[in-house]
Image (tube, rainbow, N blue to C red):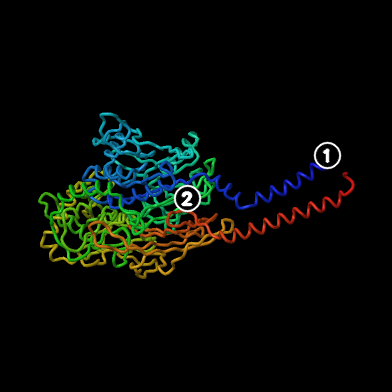
Amino acid sequence: MKRVRNFKGISVLMILTLILLMMPGNVAAEEASETETVTFVHTNDVHGFMDVEPYVKSVADYYKEENGANNVITASAGDVFGGGQAIAHLTDGEAVRDVMNAVGYDVMTIGNNDVLAQCGQVINFYNGYLNNSGGTNFPILGDNLHIGSTVDLTIDTSSNSYGEGDQPLSSYEIFTTEGGTRIGIFGVGTYMADLEYYTVDGTIESAGRCVAKLEEEGVDIIVGLIHTGWVDDLVSTSSNDVNSYQVAMAVDGIDLIIDGHSHSIINNGAGYVCDNNAGTLIVQASGYGGGIGIVNLKLDSDGNITEKSASLLSEEEYKGYGANTEVLKVLNEWVEEFEGEYKTTIGYTKYFLNGERAKDSEDKLGIRLAEQNLGNLVTDAFRYGIAQMDDVEDVDVVLFEGGRIRASIAAGDITRLDLMNVFANGGTLCIQEMTGAELQTVLKESVKSSSKGVESADYKQVSGLSFTYDTEGNIVSVTMGDGSALAEESTYRVAWAPRLTGDAKVIYDGYYELADALQVYLNSEVYANSDYSGTEGRINLISAGGQETDDSDEPDTDDSNETDSTTTDTTETDSTTTDTTETDSTAADTTETDSTATAATETDGTAVNNNGKSGTSSGNGTAQTDKHNTTTNKSGQSAKTGDSAQMGIWIVLLLSGLTGGAAILMLYRRRHSGKNE
């Protein structure tokens, strides 16, 4: 009997307990298990366009107020010390260092232009960080960067000496949140071969090493800060050995990838969630300061991620946070000191000279995908300059990569600073003899990506010839400057920047000499009598069937298909969404141009957006995935809806629970009446 009485008491207690568990007050208890939110404020490929940095500081400070100082990580995915505005490299990186220190960046990874422009100085800055003397105030990561067979003499070896194969930068950094969660961030740079002073190993191998080390460290969350590049089709590579999606799929255990290199906006800023064990979220923040990326990770009390969301603040949106005055002061002091030296007018142009990576103001393809008037001007200038040299024989052809033209020139007066910005990557121009067959091979290599609608830094602007290629990458015809057809057996003198050594004779070497050559041409009679109002048909693309293509629109773009972000049940999603955002963006010291995001449908049914220089984003972008979608608002936090509906459901459950409990109790008493007394 005692047992039965206990059963009766337990039954009532269990019913009441179940009712209490279903009440709204317990929802708060469940939500309390999500102890904290970690926010990443991230940029990539700023390339010296540092006007964005005062706003990066303001955005980071906003989230520190929201989440706590240790729960906000400000990160750069590389390409800050070269490849853009001349102020970055002509101040030996010191302007960039000082501005980033003022922002309070927590970590960065090295990009390909950081290596090419001034890797020795970047290493010096990292050593300064380690020694707390004259460096960055944050670690610089680069697991796959190693010293080559010849040591770069710009490295200060007073505190550290290096030999071949040494790794001069750190592999990873570990951060601890307010709640004690340990976040490991590893850094991997762009794979590059045949460098004089450095080697940059394969991306996947490097990422695998880093993840293994961080797992040994016992971190709770692993983040890849990589400079690899996003590609819409998930298969191609962005001037690298692999793309960021391929890294995520090949290396298990990466929770988040903050990427750079391709200047992409992925799915309106909401990123791409991979269908792998970790559900890796991949994000980028455009380039040239066109956006500030936000990633929010919600964590439970054990440091597990319960939710990932991402958004991208456009230029208009991030300016709403206001510019931090301290960072702005540091930036303005450097600009005033630097630009005064280079503001001398040295030429004039009636026309906007297009060097944009993305679409130009007339909606034509960028300089890495199509002939441009600035490409024609630059190559003509080099050909003219060589012709003026008494000790050098004239060249037949000049080839110059679109990836080495880093800025446009606005209509009007041209300053020395404009020229330095155009040649921000520096480099050399050499003369080499090659047969017609070899020249045709070089041209074919130049257009192998553009024939598929994919931009490439190797896409060459030309002078001294014109050629036609098709959408399968075949060279259809080549016509020399004198009107004759290219002869495979003939020998031609070509000025270009070969990766080869041997018989190549260096003509122009470095920023200053390239700019000097262009300045001489701008003051010549030949230039005065030339027309650079548009392109001239030097490079022509036709379909594989022989029909000329329309180069005014980017491939696979649907400008009319703008979509609204929606919240989707995570158990039901397997859909295809195409988002296209048309944006306006402005480069420093150039005329405004339109950059249009390109939407391409993926092979797995997912569409993403890719863009070059752009200020475009949707703060409410939806992350596409085979597994789930996440809706984000301006601050990147998950939207919560249906509070009224939820309250109604709880009331119904409460009443149902009380009624059911009473019924069970009455039934029990009837069945045991008179037997238990």
Q: Nearer the viewer, residue 567 or 196?
A: 567
Residue at the disc numbered 1? 2
Residue 275 falls left or right of residue 466: right
Residue 401 falls left or right of residue 344: right
Whether residue 317 is situated above or below residue 333 in the rendered picture:
below
Question: Given this view, does label 1 or label 2 mark the residue nearer the observer?
Answer: 1
- Residue at the spot 24% in from the left edge and 35% down from the top edge: 153
Residue 465 falls left or right of residue 280: left
Q: How many marks?
A: 2
- Badge 1 amino acid: Lys
Q: Nearer the viewer, residue 539 or 457?
A: 457
Residue 222 picture location, percent across and down: 47, 42
Q: Nearer the viewer, residue 106 or 603?
A: 106
Which quarter of the rendered picture does the C terminus lie within? top right
**Mark 1 to mark 2 CA distance (whole Å):** 58 Å
Residue 655 picture location, percent across and down: 69, 57
Residue at the disc numbered 2? 281
Badge 1 crowding class, 10 Å Cα cut-off, few under 14, some 14 to 19, many 20 or more, is few
Tell me the quarter of the picture where residue 466 sits: bottom left
- Badge 2 amino acid: Leu
Q: Earlier in the sequence, mark 1 or mark 2?
A: 1
Q: Secondary structure at mark 1?
A: helix
User: Can residue 558 be spotted in the picture?
Assistant: yes
Residue 501 falls left or right of residue 553: left
- Residue at the spot 27% in from the left edge and 38% down from the top edge: 120
Tell me the quarter of the picture where residue 344 sits: bottom left
Q: Nearer the viewer, residue 135 or 162?
A: 135
